[in-house]
Amino acid sequence: MNYTELLIAREKDLGRPVRVGLAGAGQMGSGLAAQIGKIPGMSLVACADIDIGRAENALRLAGVEYVKHNKEASKSIESGQGGVVDNASALAELPIDIVFEATGVPWVGAEVADACIEAQKHILMLNVETDVTIGMYLANKANKNNVVYSVANGDEPVACKELYDFSVDLGFEIVCVGKGKNNPLDQTANPDTCLEKATKKNMNPKMLASFEDGSKTMIEMTALANAINLPPDQIGMNGPVSSVEELNKVLIPQADGGVLSESGRVDYAFGPAPGVFSIVKSDNPTVIEEMEYLSMGEGPYYTLYRPYHLASIEAPRSIGMAIINNEPGLQPKSWIAEVIGHAKKDLKKGEKIDGIGGFATYGVTYPVADTDNLIPLGLLEGATVIKELKKGEPITKDSVELPENLINSLRKLQEAS
C-alpha cells in the first residue's frame, strides 16, 4: 500500500499534514527528522531533547525554521511552525498526532509512551529497550485508548516480522526468524573501549557498546519473539556464524544437521548483517520442484532474505500504518522472552548501575521460564548493588535495590495483569 497518497488525501481533507513529535534528537532522531522533511502528508513540528540546540536542529532538518519553546510551543505548532520542549513527556500535551520515541533510554521511553497513550496520541518506538521491558503493558493500554503503540518500522524487529508475515501468508512452516549481527560479540565492551571506533563512525560510544556487548541484538530479537510468539531456542540464543547461502543448513533443527532444538525459533547469525531472514520449510513435492525452478535451492529448507534495514530512514512508514490503518508494525502479543541483565564486571556493594551500553551490565535473551528471580535489563539503570556479583553473573532480585521510578511501577502493573 502506498501510504503517502492516502496521507496527501488526508491533508487535503483536514487542511494540514499529520503533525509529528520526536523525543530524542541524536543520531537516530536526526536521521528520522531529515527523512520526514522529504515526505508529503506529514510534518515534524515538535521535538524534545535535553540539548535544546539538538532539538532545534532536528526541526531545521525537517524544514521547520521558526521555533518556539516550552509554553509557547503549542501556539507555534498551531500556527504552522515548530515547538521545542525540554521535557520529553511534555510532547503529550502538544497539538500533535503521533510521537516517535528515539531516546534509547528505557525509563525515558516509559514516561513518554505512557504520557502519549494517556493523551490518546499514537506512539512509535525507536526505543526497543522500553518495549522489551514494559511493552505488553503499553500495548494493552494503547488498545484500550484506541491509539497505536508500536515498535517503529526500519529496525530489525519490524523488518523480521514483515518477512515472518510473508512466510505465514505463503503457507510455509516457519523454522527460524532473525537478523544478522555485524559487530563481534564482546560482552565486556564499554564506552571507553568503543570510544575510538565510535568517534570514527560519528556514533555515541555508549550506543556502539550496546551493539558490541550483544545487548542490542538480544533486545531486538526479544521484541520479535514476543510479537510473533516464537521463543528463543536457548538462553542467549545460538548465534552461529553463517553466510546467507548456508543459513538454511545451519538455523534448522539438529535432526537435520542444524543447531536448533526444533522448528519455530527466533535467533541471529554472524554474517548476514545488515539483513534479516526467515528460514522456512515445505514438504510438498510440487512446491519443492517449483522452488528449485525459482532458484531457491533444492529444499526442503529455504532462506527468505532481505539484505537491508533502513532504520530511521524507513521509520516514517510507521506513520501511515498508524494514522491510515490504525495498525502497529510490531507490538507484543505474548510475553515469552526477556532480556536479563548480567554483570559486565565484578559489582561491589554500593555501586550504582548505569544504563544500557555502559560499564556495569549487558543483556542476555532468556526464555521466560528461565527468568525466576532475575532482573530485566531495562529496569536496572539507577539501581544500587546490595549483594556482590561476579563478572558474567545474571543480576538477581536480591542483589540490587531498584530505583523508584515509573518504568519499575509499570513493570509491576504488567506482571500483575
Image (cartoon, rainbow, N blue to C red):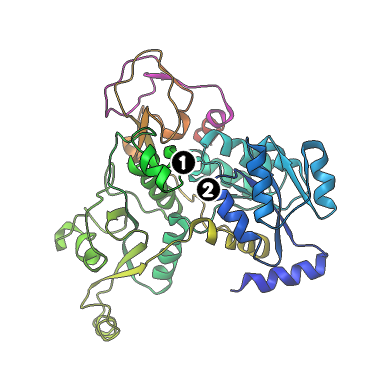
Indicate yes or no whether the magenta region holds residue 145.
Answer: no
Vertical placement of 48 versus 398: above or below?
below
Q: Position of residue 344 (x, y in %)?
A: 32, 29
Which corner quadrant of the image does residue 366 belong to? Answer: top left
Q: Is residue 36 left or right of residue 371?
A: right
- Which residue in the protein does label 1 denote? 204
Q: As rendered, which of 138 and 130 lies closer to the eye?
A: 130
Amino acid at pointer 1? Asn
Q: Residue at x 68, y 48 (%)?
A: 145
Vertical placement of 383 versus 55: above or below?
above
Which corner quadrant of the image does residue 327 belong to? Answer: bottom right
Amino acid at pointer 2? Gln
Q: Which mark is residue 370?
A: none
Main SS of the magenta part reads: loop
Q: As rendered, which of 285 and 75 lies closer to the eye?
A: 75
Work out whether mark 2 precedes mark 1 in sequence or the reverse, and give the earlier one.
2
Vertical placement of 238 versus 107: above or below?
below
Residue range corresponding to the magenta coloring? 386-409
Query: Is residue 389 among the parts visible in the rendering?
Result: yes
Q: Are marks 2 and 1 in contact (CB under 8 Å)?
A: yes
- Which residue in the protein does label 2 denote? 27
